[in-house]
Image (tube, rainbow, N blue to C red):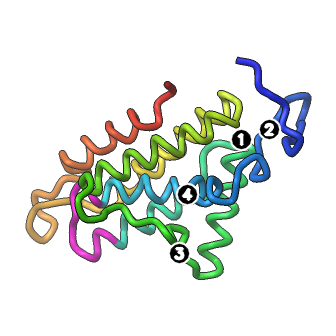
Amino acid sequence: RPRAAHPASLRTKGRVVTTKSDFSEEEWSRIVRAPLVAGLAISLADPGGPIEAAKESMATVKSATNPSSREQLVAEVALDIQAEVQQKRNPLKGYRPSSEGTAPSGEQVLVELSAVQAIVAARATPEETAAFGHWLVDSAQAAANAAKEGGFMGFGAAQVSKGEKEMLDQVRAAVAPA
């Protein structure tokens, strides 16, 4: 689909790239949080103890600050996450996945990921949108792979639990192209 020209968009090597200035401040905050929300989805799918939660959080931050894509938009978001972490600020600030009388927090996380993917899709190129979605899945996968779940003292534990596998599939579906 043809893309409307944004005055703030950059041109690199003849193609338009989407940058932070193409989004409102509130949209950008949601975009920056999204890779961490994807990791949170895994933690909510199969809550472990504090050690598992710490491992999953660290793996998510590592994935969020080292994306496999070199798309301008993804790189810019990763740099913002890295700046938040280096300044010891919580990149998830302001995000609460549950409130009284609403859907379970896992569902709310999926709704948020889907909404953020739609925000990106509305302004970014299809390539940037796809790269952003893959990065969200990578962040969720990193959290899932970070700690063994279940078992006793490490015996009989699974690397990725059934609940985590199901949530990974739901994250993939939430960020899949419409």
Q: Amino acid at mark 1?
A: Glu
Q: Amino acid at mark 2?
A: Val
Could you tell me which quadrant the N terminus lies in? top right
User: Are discs 4 and 2 less than 8 Å apart at CB?
Assistant: no
Q: Earlier in the sequence, mark 3 or mark 1?
A: 1
User: Are discs 3 and 2 less than 8 Å apart at CB?
Assistant: no
Instruction: Give the residue pinned by disc 4.
Output: 64
Give the main secondary structure, helix, strand or loop, of the magenta stretch. Answer: helix
Instruction: Give the residue pinned by disc 1.
Output: 71
In the picture, measured across the screen, residue 106 lies left or right of residue 29, that is: left
User: Are discs 1 and 2 less than 8 Å apart at CB?
Assistant: yes
Instruction: Give the residue pinned by disc 3.
Output: 90
Q: Earlier in the sequence, mark 1 or mark 2?
A: 2
Q: Secondary structure at mark 2?
A: strand
Instruction: Give the residue pinned by disc 2.
Output: 17
Magenta-tinted stretch: 44-53
